Amino acid sequence: MWTTQRQALVIERAFDARMAKEKDLNVRANMASEREWEASEYWGALSEIRSHRLLARARKIYLAPEGMEWITDGFANRYLSDPSLSKLNKLVVEENRKTWEFRFKIIGVAVGALTGLVGTLIGLVAIWKKK
């Protein structure tokens, strides 16, 4: 992911340097659209990676996302639309939060039971030594 992002930024910076030297507004506008087209391949690839990673996280916790909108760009990158990506991320975060809350409750009950057991054992040892 890092290399793909760096490549997109290199392309954008190269165009920015050429655009800064250009005086004609029409040429600059053409260069700006060419810049977007050239970098969009890499940004689309990044979006595809992010979408598939998030989908893998959702599958790992057995979430079945419904109504997700997929976009396929001109470079055959297939990724989730921004609203779908946001919705799926929110579902994954919420499910993970619920899982951790459950784990903490179980740990709290176990610690409480262990504390009670240790107190009982101390009491039994004190009674046993007294006899």
Image (spheres, rainbow, N blue to C red):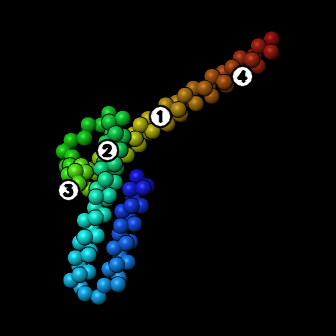
Question: Going from the N terminus, do you reach mark 4 or mark 1 first?
Answer: 1
Q: Which mark is residue 122?
A: 4
Residues at marks 3 and 2, CA–CA distance in whole angstroms: 18 Å
Residue 103 is marked as 1
Residue 61 position in % (x across, y down)? 36, 35
**Sooner in the amino-acid sequence: mark 1 or mark 2:** 2
Q: Disc 3 and disc 4: Cα gap in Å?
A: 72 Å
Q: Quadrant of the C terminus?
A: top right
Residue count near mark 4 (Cα–Cα under 10 Å), binned few <14, some 14–19, many ≥20? few
The CA span between labels 3 and 1 is 45 Å
Whether residue 85 is visible to the viewer of this picture, yes or no, is yes
> How many numbered marks are there?
4
- Identify the residue position indicated by label 2 in the image: 52
Q: Which of the two marks, 3 or 1, is nearer to us in this view? A: 3
Q: Residue furthest top?
A: 131
- Furthest residue in direction bottom, as rendered: 23
The outermost residue toward the right is 130
Labels 3 and 4: the sequence-earlier one: 3
Q: Amino acid at mark 3?
A: Gly
Residue of label 3: 74
Q: Earlier in the sequence, mark 4 or mark 2?
A: 2
